[in-house]
Amino acid sequence: MRLILFGSPGVGKGTQAKILSSKLNIPHISTGDILRLAVREQTPLGIKAQEVMASGELVSDDIMIGIIKYTLEQDKCAKGFILDGFPRTHEQAHAFDDMLEKMNIHDVYVVNLTANENEIITRLTNRRACKECKTIFSVSEIKGLSKCPKCGTEDSFYQRSDDTEDVIRHRLDVFKESTQPVLRHYTVKKKVITIDALGTVDEVYDRILKALNNVAPDEISISA
């Protein structure tokens, strides 16, 4: 099974991607992670990306597509993948489509996670991070605690600058402007599965799994 996880900041893409990766036994491909790996391994494209980032510029679509193509060609992706964080723009979606066509990959589904904007703002502004181990918690998870439950550091909780309301609203505006056209692009191709992302993590996962079973039952194989 090949999936693209789509949705606004704070909707829970990363959390669901990790669960689906474990349950479906296919790799979770975070574009940020594979970009850092390419740089660390000093692959030809990784070297180019490093030079671009060192100059303060954004990595070009061509470089990013190349790194994604290299990743999808690995044996670990033979049975499928979960792509998280790409494509982000209409131009990237077209380039990605061309790449998949050349690789003879056609059975890609877009899982579109949705949530009320006010709920997203509430969810993100109620996040706190540990200064020591960087683990992120909801306020309810650490209520009454003085130590980080992950690393044990005293008085380490703080609100990250990108979890303030003004920053979140700006991120949501950017998402609407640049990334929503990607959803329209895939909706025309009738590959979009829209999931209500409000509720517990397990509830959202169950909705995704039910929807995938409806469109591609033969491709679902759940690991224990």
Image (cartoon, rainbow, N blue to C red):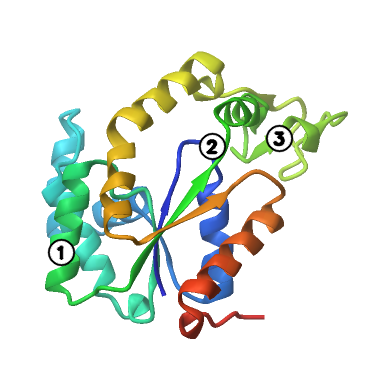
Name which of mark 2 and mark 3 comes first in the sequence.
2
Of circles 2 and 3, the one toward us is 2
- How many neighbours does mark 1 have within 10 angstroms: few (below 14), some (14-19), or many (20 or more)? some
The residue positioned 21% from the left and 67% from the top of the image is 70
- Marks 3 and 1, the one that precedes in the sequence: 1
Residue highlighted by disc 2: 10
Q: Residues within 10 Å of mark 3 (few under 14, many from 20)?
A: some
Residue 13 placed where, x, y %? 50, 49
Q: Position of residue 140 (x, y in %)?
A: 79, 33
220 with respect to 38 (left or right):
right
Residue that label 3 marks: 138
Q: Residue 121 or 154: which is nearer the viewer?
A: 121
Residue situated in front as seen by the camera: 58 or 123: 123
Q: Which residue is mark 1?
A: 99
Identify the secondary structure beneath mark 2: loop
Q: How many marks?
A: 3
Secondary structure of the residue carrying tag 3 is: strand
